[in-house]
Each structure stands twice: as C-alpha cells, then as structure tokens.
Image (spheres, rainbow, N blue to C red):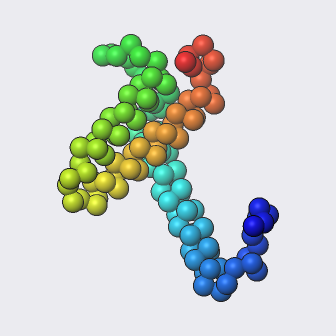
C-alpha cells in the first residue's frame, strides 16, 4: 500500500465529486465557525481573552477550559434529546471554544498560560 498522497486523477469520478463536495462543506463549516467567533468577539468585547473577573478570578485560558467542560457536559446531558438543532448549536459552540483556546495560547503572555 502506497503512503503517497492521492491526486484527483487517482480517484474514480464519483470519488472526485465526493472529495470536492467534502472540501466545499469543510470550508462552509469553517466559515460558519469563523463568522460566529467574529460576531461574538464584537458583541462581547473580547471577553474570552480579557475577562472582567467580577465573579471569577480565573485567567482567560482557565475560563475557556471551563466553558469547554460545560459544552461537553451539555452534549452528554442532551444525548437523550432528539433535537438536532440543540446538538448542532452546542457542537458549534464547542468548536468555537476550542479555537478560542488556540487563539489564547497564541496571543496571551506566557505567564498567563498553564
């Protein structure tokens, strides 16, 4: 079995269409997450990376981790619900927080990171 990457000509025509459709959907889903994160960043005033810490003294990265835990718990809790919309909203939020965690690691001062 070859470990070389496959080119489009290595696929059958149906495979090429599926590959193209998959890549378009990946781009669409990434664009949706990007739009959500940018909109929320504007609405919340960059609170993910600069929390006001009224009730919590946690640093930004720890607060993002808490939100990731919350979203995972929600997915676990709503498993028995048959609501695709609730699942999709929660999944989108989870992906967003995972990206924010990467952004925090890239932008925050090293001492703030654990």
Q: Quadrant of the N terminus?
A: bottom right
Left or right side of 23 for 54? left
Q: Nearer the viewer, residue 49 or 8?
A: 8
From what the image shows, is residue 30 above or below residue 94?
Answer: below
Left or right side of 47 for 16? right
From what the image shows, is residue 28 above or below residue 89?
Answer: below
* x and y percentages locating residue 34 in the rendered image: 52, 50
Residue located 59% across and 23% down the image: 108
Specify the farthest residue to the left: 81
Q: Nearer the viewer, residue 30 or 83?
A: 83
Q: How many marks?
A: 0
- Residue 99 appearing in the image: yes
Specify the farthest residue to the bottom: 13
From what the image shows, is residue 47 above or below residue 79?
Answer: above
Residue 77: name its quadrant. Answer: top left
Specify the farthest residue to the front: 1
- Residue 42 appearing in the image: no
Q: Nearer the viewer, residue 67 or 48?
A: 67
Q: Quadrant of the C terminus?
A: top right
Residue located 38% across and 50% down the image: 91
* x and y percentages locating residue 19 in the rendered image: 61, 73
Residue located 53% across and 41% down the image: 99
Residue 11: name its quadrant. Answer: bottom right
* x and y percentages locating residue 113 in the rendered image: 57, 19
Left or right side of 101 for 69? left
Residue 81: name its quadrant. Answer: bottom left
* x and y percentages locating residue 41 in the rendered image: 46, 39
Left or right side of 6 for 14? left
């Amino acid at each position: 079995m070859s470990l070389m990457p496959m080119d489009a000509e290595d696929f059958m025509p149906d495979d090429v269409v599926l590959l193209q459709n998959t890549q378009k959907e990946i781009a669409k889903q990434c664009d949706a997450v990007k739009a959500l994160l940018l909109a929320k960043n504007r609405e919340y005033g960059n609170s993910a990376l600069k929390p006001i810490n009224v009730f919590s003294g946690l640093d930004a990265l720890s607060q993002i981790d808490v939100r990731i835990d919350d979203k995972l718990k929600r997915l676990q809790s709503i498993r028995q619900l048959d609501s695709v919309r609730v699942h999709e909203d929660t999944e989108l939020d989870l992906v967003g927080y995972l990206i924010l965690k990467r952004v925090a690691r890239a932008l925050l001062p090293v001492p703030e990171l654990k």
